[in-house]
Image (tube, rainbow, N blue to C red):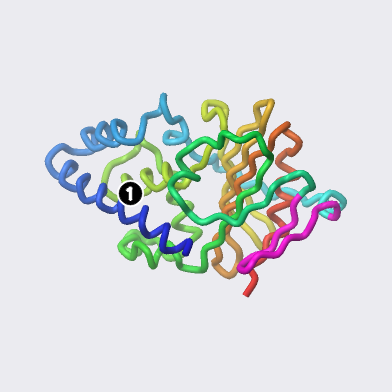
């Protein structure tokens, strides 16, 4: 079901890419960037479109004492341990989750898993650009930057970046990092500006599974070390 819903919204992005191909052919990169800005936002209205992770790779030690306080939860396709006080939801990819700000005032953790190669199956043409697995797909997406769009592939990943990024609070204060754990690697977009914290975690494991963990931390109880402890407990369930 998640794959079907993702395919629906990905197909819309592909239709937009076809239109952009016509624009870049006759107008060039500058016109392409202006067209995208008009459609999904610019650096001022949507700062995340012009942000990317730094070169530093975080390799944080996991606080085992804190991890032992987390409560295990099992879903049909994945398991994770989370703190008390959070509503836990296994998400499907759907437009309103990624594009609308949550209006409720509950602390919540949304979870998503995609099997190895899921993104490549949905859009095989990215293989021509050297994208061979979920991690490389997400890496290209995270480094997409409106100011650096030169071709249709650049435009595709920027559009997908806007689709994939949930509400992370005040984007002007948001940060993007990449990390490496013993069996997991990925990227975290986060905003830690009281009264609430937001963490958008995009994670790949050694087997090629992709996890998304979105944390809306009402009351700002968590820090990055806590978040790393949470995602370190992620496991696929066969």
- Give the quadrant of the C terminus: bottom right
Examine the structure image and report whether residue 51 is included in the region drawn in magenta.
no
Question: Camera-side residue: 94 or 40?
Answer: 94
Badge 1 density bin: few <14, some 14–19, many ≥20, Cα 10 Å: many
Q: In percent of the image, x 41 and y 43: which residue is there? A: 144
Name, please, the residue furthest toward the left.
Answer: 26
For image coordinates 53% across by 37% down, the residue present is: 167
Q: Who's the residue at 84% across and 54% down the image?
A: 64
The answer to whether residue 88 is left or right of residue 55 is right
| Magenta residue span | 68-82
**Which residue occupies the foreground of this view, 109 or 229?**
109
Which of the 4 quarters of the picture holds residue 224?
Answer: top right
Tell me, yes or no, whether the highlighted magenta stretch contains residue 72: yes
Residue at the disc numbered 1: 156
Q: Position of residue 63 (x, y in %)?
A: 82, 50
From the image, give the main secondary structure of the stretch colored magenta. Answer: strand
Q: At 28% from the left edge and 53% from the top edge, which residue is drawn?
A: 14
Extreme residue in the right direction:
65
Q: Secondary structure at mark 1?
A: helix
């Amino acid at each position: 079901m998640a794959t079907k819903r993702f395919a629906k919204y990905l197909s819309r992005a592909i239709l937009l890419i076809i239109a952009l191909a016509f624009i870049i052919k006759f107008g060039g990169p500058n016109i392409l960037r202006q067209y995208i800005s008009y459609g999904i936002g610019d650096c001022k209205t949507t700062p995340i479109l012009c942000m990317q992770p730094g070169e530093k790779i975080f390799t944080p030690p996991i606080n085992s004492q804190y991890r032992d306080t987390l409560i295990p939860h099992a879903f049909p396709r994945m398991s994770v341990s989370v703190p008390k006080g959070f509503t836990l939801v296994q998400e499907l990819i759907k437009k309103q989750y990624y594009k609308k700000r949550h209006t409720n005032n509950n602390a919540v953790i949304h979870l998503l898993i995609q099997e190895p190669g899921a993104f490549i199956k949905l859009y095989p043409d990215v293989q021509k650009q050297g994208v061979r697995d979920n991690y490389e797909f997400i890496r290209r997406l995270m480094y997409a930057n409106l100011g650096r769009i030169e071709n249709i592939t650049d435009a595709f990943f920027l559009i997908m970046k806007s689709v994939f990024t949930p509400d992370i609070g005040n984007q002007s204060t948001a940060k993007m990092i990449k990390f490496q754990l013993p069996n997991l690697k990925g990227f975290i977009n986060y905003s830690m500006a009281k009264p609430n914290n937001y963490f958008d975690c995009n994670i790949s494991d050694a087997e090629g599974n992709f996890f998304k963990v979105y944390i809306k931390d009402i009351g700002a109880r968590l820090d990055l070390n806590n978040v790393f402890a949470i995602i370190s407990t992620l496991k696929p369930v066969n």
